[in-house]
Amino acid sequence: MALLFTLLLTAAACILGYFLVDFGRQDFLRETEAAIDIEIRTLANLESHTPAAITAYITRREAHDKTVKFRYENERGAWLAGTIDPVPTALKKLTEGVLRFDWQADSGQETFAAKIHTFVDGSRIIVARNIDDLIASYHRLQYFSVLIMFLMLGVILVSFGISYFVVSRINRIAATAQQIVDTGDLSRRIGIDSEWDDLSNLSRVLNGFLERIEILMHSAREVSNSIAHDLRTPLAGLRGEIETLKGGKASDEKIDAILADADRILSIFQAILRIANLQRASREQFRSHVDLAHILHDVTELYEPLAQEKQIHLSSDIMDSAVVTGDSDLLFQLLANLFDNAIKFSPPGSSITLQLAQSNDRIIFRISDGGPGIPDHEKEKVFRHFYRGDSSRHTPGSGLGLSLAKAIAEYHGAQIMLEDANPGLCVKITF
């Protein structure tokens, strides 16, 4: 299609150039012939007068207009009047009825167009007009016509290049999409070999879109596997405990154990649903102003007895007021999850440090513990559903705490990061 478009534009450019040159030539001939015909009609009107009248007119016109020359001769070809003498020998046909010849004048060689008119008495007159200026204009027209044609051809070639580039990129995008549809392989990406064009930008966006879909699909598979793995043990235990109740009397201890297993299963599903709802919800749903410092004091007061029980020292550096826009219950759960993790993984006798400060227009919260920390290669993975790092495999939990914390942080437009506390882990949230 691009090649056909290019051929059509090329043909149009050639036709336009041809008509420009041809129109200029025809206009030049018409103008020249019309001017000569006016002179001949004037001389024909003088034919009824004496030859002296014609001679006087010729003398007057040549003196007044230097671009006009005449040769008046009798029926035998003898010169009677005019400056054309002798008759030019190198006469050429300019068009039908119009001749062309070169004349050596005082200022140099000049080119004339001429017509011959024969009077009734047999005498003849050659009426010639200088066409140097018209020829120069015609040559300029030819030059500009050729220039226009080359410019149009340049535009055509550039258009063809752009069309070919666009079509090839679109075909590449379509081919990649078709391969993904045919194979289901979301790891395929669109090739990008330039940085300046809009289609490369579109390809980058689509690659990011495919990467996001691949991550979501991988997360969905991981969640399914993790749910099956994490629920298998409590469900098996729950089934075994129910089996032991057959034909016997259930004690309060047995019922409490069954309820604990059921509550654990329900808490896992509630956490999953909470994360899904947060990821699907819009930030526009809340408009209230919340004092993050006040919430942090409440969380510290709640978990301080548990920290004292493990002989963990708490130190804090909290600003007086840190107002953010958000949901107070969700922010409380976010800080509580992080506090619970810090106490859970900190060994007895260690310390936990809290910091809430403002930097420019951002509010930054940090909580650092003295636990084993998280290796760099696991810092992104721990935010996935049910992911349990090597250091936490023997610690009670569902593997959803940091996933829920990240979902709440992103719901509030905040960024959560994990850093090394040397020793331990530092969780940093920037609002």
Image (cartoon, grey):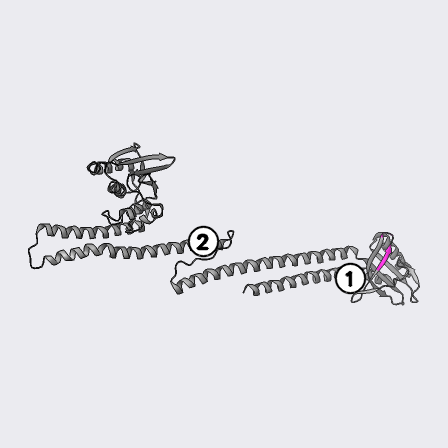
What SS does tag 1 mark?
Answer: helix
Q: Along the polypeptide, which appears first: circle 1 or circle 2?
A: 1
Q: Residue at x 63, y 59 (%)?
A: 153
Residue 237 vertical placement versus 365 (above, below): below
Q: The magenta stretch spans which residues?
A: 102-107
Residue 292 numbered tag:
none
Residue that label 1 marks? 33
Q: Is residue 281 visible?
A: no
- Image marks 1 and 2: residues in contact by CB distance under 8 Å: no
Q: Is residue 184 left or right of residue 32?
A: left
x, y percent for residue 321: 30, 33
Q: Nearer the viewer, residue 416 or 275?
A: 416
Q: Residue at x 39, y 61 (%)?
A: 185
The amino acid on which the numbered mark 2 sits, given as a three-letter code, is Arg
What's the magenta bit mostly, secondary-structure-wise? strand
Q: Nearer the viewer, residue 125 or 146?
A: 146
Image quarter for residue 76? bottom right
x, y percent for residue 431: 34, 40
